[in-house]
Image (cartoon, rainbow, N blue to C red):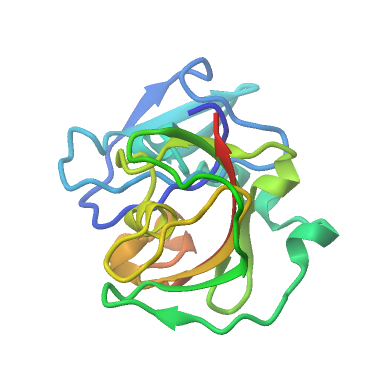
Amino acid sequence: MNSTAFLPGTKVPTKIYTPCSSSNVKIPDATSVRFTRQLQKSSYLDQKLVQENGNPVLCTRREALGFGFCTGLAAAMFQPQPAEAAEATPCELTVSPSGLAFCDKVVGYGPQAVKGQLIKAHYVGKLENGKVFDSSYNRGKPLTFRVGAGEVIKGWDLGILGGEGVPPMLAGGKRTLKLPPELGYGMRGAGCKGGSCIIPPESVLLFDVEFIGKV
């Protein structure tokens, strides 16, 4: 991944923490919440103990690779949003058969993404109560990932590529996504430490996604 952020995923078992170096995971100054697809196999879910400036930060291998949470830097995620990211334009959501709800604030003008394609997207992630837990706008850099390749949580792949009643996004488009737990972090939640989670288990997630286009 070329940018830090959260990537959509689902169920996950137990956590096992192992050391990893900062060379393996790039943690930006502003925030370091990332979304990565939560796979069932524990071999892919090995946890990482990230050393950044000598300070240990707990995060999963999955999270370190994609939209992973590095919980030691969680406070940085709750910064004020820039005006363009914080705008709350009313949007009537359409619920698809998958449970994913969507609303296009701006219909794109470019080509749609192709499965496996490397794309760029800006986003703001919020809990259902409106609390922002991550924003690529704050970092000043969009998220880069391969869409449809399991690098992000399922709701993101579905919300951008389309399918199951969801139309594909076009480059230049802006879409609000409302993800049920099974298309987000499910029973596991994310960024959990000491009995507290940045994204609690069974959370409904809201994302304002701006699909910039292919890399």
99 up-or-down from 148: above or below: below
Residue 174 percent across, percent down from the top left:
61, 60
Which quarter of the rendering shows the C terminus?
A: top right
Residue nearer the viewer, 169 or 91: 169
Query: Residue extending furthest top?
Result: 23
Residue 158 percent across, percent down from the top left:
35, 57
Residue appearing at x 37%, y 60% in the figure:
155
The number of numbered badges drawn on the structure is 0
Residue 185 percent across, percent down from the top left:
35, 59
Residue nearer the viewer, 119 or 125: 119
Residue 102 in sight in this render: yes
Residue appearing at x 38%, y 52% in the figure:
161
50 up-or-down from 175: above or below: above
115 up-or-down from 187: above or below: above
Residue nearer the viewer, 93 or 187: 93
10 up-or-down from 151: above or below: below
Residue appearing at x 46%, y 19% in the figure:
24
Residue appearing at x 20%, y 52% in the figure:
13
Residue 80 in sight in this render: no
Q: Is residue 59 left or right of residue 28?
A: left
Q: Is residue 11 left or right of residue 80?
A: left
Residue 114 percent across, percent down from the top left:
37, 40
**Quarter of the image holding residue 105?**
bottom right
